[in-house]
């Protein structure tokens, strides 16, 4: 074959020019040629090599070539490409240049991705959904506060109290008019009432300071939760957090495990509470009259409100995320700890709702018969104010040995009030109310025991599962009763200069948690030794809803069942009709689980 068919020459042939020279050995470019030289040079062998005609000399000009063929032209037998003017870099060198140009940016992007992947491995994902839910919970609470204000206005308009102004005259000086500074401050205070009510519903205290100049000063503090606002804020935070965890728990919008839920819930609650404290303090109701030496300031911003709002936002957010997480394999051992508070809530509502309806209807009929129909209308219009508070008092009375307690202390005689510590028992109600109440209170534990027994599984031979199964209900009833004590307690403290001070407290008796503990233990005993005998006669529609998600998880884990992918929905696990997408796997309940 002609020699020109071997442009690179035979490196092993010593008779050919350049054969066996170091320049022809395997180099960095992988083809045995010398590195690319951008400028022509004669080299160490001069301008040409005598007796060779196979390639151009080092100093001779190569014929012009196209840019596309410059990089692919055959090199000389000496392993060096002939110079032909400015040549384009080869493909490998172009790739190296591009890689060098993008080196820093690519390293930065890779580091960010690695950091995100590492955070997701420990359960820390996107915080934006959690932050949005925290803001949403506070906005819903402000909406509930507006509803309470509207209810109070309607009650004032329909109350049979005669002239709402009390026959007095409205001051028309500059301090009360919108053009005066005091008038604008009063308007700001009225606009800020929703913020004050939300603060009061977050375990804050509404404090009023009145300065009467020569006559001294007076302070008043009211502590009591408008439960409609509290329940609206807590329920929104919990349900929305659970929804986003179940629907968007994977991919770019989620991947939060327990650690991420704890971190972002705490930060979200802190951010909301900082804004709430500022808004509550700025919109404080304040009136000053320098001519009379009178000043009035009312607000509910304080340390108690700060930590209360933080807890009522952050804790439901965290629990909602945990409720929406995919449960680990060991969850069945402690599942009763999560189900027991739900049973305690179901027990309280199953008793309180029918009794509340009975008392409301019976009381309305009795008041109408006595000719107090106007008061009945006012009471029903004021349901957003007192409805949930009255409902929360009934579970305590339903324990039959827990009364309402009214305690008054201080210089109560100066205020025309009798000093004492009074108890109101269930039998202090009219007979047509307390007899049905007792019957319902005795029946509900039997129904709740059936609910607790259906589809319950306790691993035999596991000490932890056995201990948890016995302790879950008593501890849940005890803890929920403590929460109920804090929610329904109302206190008033008044101090008036030379007159004295008055303190009044109303709530459920403090021994209610102990009674609730034994009621939970009684329900556990009924569920173990009584409910199995009548469980077959109970319609599934009444009790199957309680452990629905647990049944779905067991069905998905059983061998031999349909292996279709399971998707998480707001109602639990359900078969997915779509092929699994190659996204980030769900965040672990705990890192490493």
Image (cartoon, rainbow, N blue to C red):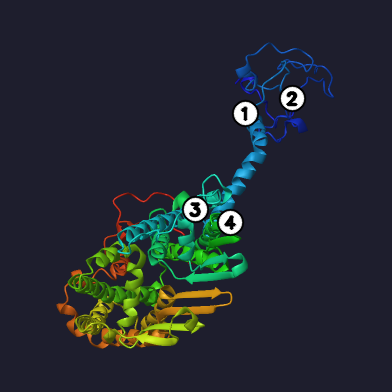
Q: Which residue is outermost to the left?
A: 537
For disc 4, the marked residue is 289
User: Do we see residue 106 in this rendering?
Assistant: yes
Distance between the alpha carbons at the discs numbered 2 and 1: 22 Å
Lower position in the chain sequence, tag 4 or tag 1: 1
Q: How crowded is the residue under tag 4: few (<14 C-alpha within 10 Å), some, or many (20+)? A: some
Judge depth for marks 4 and 1 and give the one in front. 4
* Residue in view at x 51 percent, y 48 percent: 177
Distance between the alpha carbons at the discs numbered 4 and 1: 86 Å
60 left or right of 221 in image: right
Distance between the alpha carbons at the discs numbered 3 and 4: 11 Å
Judge depth for marks 3 and 1 and give the one in front. 3
SS state under label 1: helix
Judge depth for marks 3 and 2 and give the one in front. 3
Lower position in the chain sequence, tag 3 or tag 1: 1
| Image location (x, y in percent) of residue 188 | 51, 51
Quadrant for the N terminus in the image: top right
Lower position in the chain sequence, tag 2 or tag 1: 2
Judge depth for marks 2 and 1 and give the one in front. 1
For disc 1, the marked residue is 91
Lower position in the chain sequence, tag 3 or tag 4: 3
Q: Are marks 4 and 2 in contact (CB under 8 Å)?
A: no
Q: How crowded is the residue under tag 3: few (<14 C-alpha within 10 Å), some, or many (20+)? A: few
> Of residues 553 and 103, which is closer to you in this image?
553
Residue 534 vs 167, above or below: the answer is below
């Amino acid at each position: 074959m002609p020699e020109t068919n071997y442009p690179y020459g035979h490196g092993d042939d010593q008779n050919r020019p350049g054969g066996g020279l170091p320049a022809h050995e395997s180099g960095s470019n992988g083809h045995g040629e010398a590195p690319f030289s951008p400028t022509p040079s004669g080299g160490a062998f001069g301008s040409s090599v005598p007796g060779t005609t196979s390639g151009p000399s080092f100093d001779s000009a190569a014929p012009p070539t196209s840019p596309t063929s410059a990089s692919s032209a055959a090199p000389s037998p000496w392993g060096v490409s002939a110079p032909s003017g400015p040549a384009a870099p080869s493909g490998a060198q172009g790739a190296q240049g591009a890689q060098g140009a993008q080196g820093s940016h690519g390293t930065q992007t890779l580091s960010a991705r690695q950091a995100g992947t590492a955070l997701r491995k420990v359960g820390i994902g996107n915080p934006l959904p959690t932050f949005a839910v925290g803001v949403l919970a506070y906005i819903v609470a402000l909406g509930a506060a507006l509803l309470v204000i509207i209810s109070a206005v309607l009650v004032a308009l329909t109350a049979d109290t005669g002239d709402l102004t009390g026959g007095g005259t409205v001051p028309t000086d500059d301090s009360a008019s919108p053009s005066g500074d005091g008038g604008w401050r009063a308007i700001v205070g009225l606009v800020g009432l929703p913020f004050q009510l939300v603060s009061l519903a977050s375990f804050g205290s509404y404090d009023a300071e009145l300065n009467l100049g020569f006559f001294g000063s007076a302070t008043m503090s009211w502590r009591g939760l408008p439960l409609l606002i509290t329940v609206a804020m807590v329920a929104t935070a919990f349900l929305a957090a659970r929804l986003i965890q179940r629907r968007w728990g994977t991919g770019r919008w989620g991947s939060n495990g327990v650690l991420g839920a704890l971190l972002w819930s705490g930060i979200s609650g802190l951010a909301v509470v900082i804004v709430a404290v500022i808004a509550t303090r700025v919109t404080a109701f304040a009136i000053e009259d320098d001519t009379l030496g009178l000043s009035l300031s009312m607000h509910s911003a304080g340390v108690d409100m700060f930590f209360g709002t933080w807890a009522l936002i952050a804790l439901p957010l965290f629990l909602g995320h945990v409720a929406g997480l995919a449960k680990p394999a060991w969850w069945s051992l402690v599942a009763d700890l999560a189900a027991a508070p739900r049973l305690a809530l179901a027990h309280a509502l199953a008793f309180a709702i029918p009794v509340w309806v009975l008392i409301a209807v019976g009381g309305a009929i009795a008041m109408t018969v006595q000719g107090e129909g106007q008061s009945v209308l006012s009471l029903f219009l004021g349901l957003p104010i007192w409805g949930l508070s009255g409902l929360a008092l009934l579970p305590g009375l339903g324990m039959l040995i827990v009364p309402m307690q009214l305690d008054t202390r201080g210089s109560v005689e100066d205020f025309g009030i009798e000093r004492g510590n009074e108890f109101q028992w269930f039998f202090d109600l009219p007979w047509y109310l307390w007899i049905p109440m007792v019957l319902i209170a005795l029946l509900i534990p039997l129904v709740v025991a059936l609910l607790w027994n259906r589809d319950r599984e306790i691993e035999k031979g596991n000490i932890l599962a056995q201990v948890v199964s016995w302790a879950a209900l008593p501890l849940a009833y005890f803890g929920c009763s403590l929460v109920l004590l804090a929610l329904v307690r109302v206190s008033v403290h008044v101090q008036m200069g030379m007159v004295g001070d008055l303190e009044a407290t109303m709530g459920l008796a403090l021994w209610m948690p102990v009674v609730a503990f034994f009621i939970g233990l009684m329900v556990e005993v009924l569920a173990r030794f009584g409910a199995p005998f009548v469980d077959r006669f109970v319609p599934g529609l009444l009790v199957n809803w309680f452990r629905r998600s647990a049944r779905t998880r067991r069905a998905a884990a059983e061998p031999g069942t349909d292996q279709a992918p399971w998707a998480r929905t707001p109602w639990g696990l359900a078969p997915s009709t779509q092929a699994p997408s190659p996204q980030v796997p769900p965040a672990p309940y705990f890192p490493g689980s």
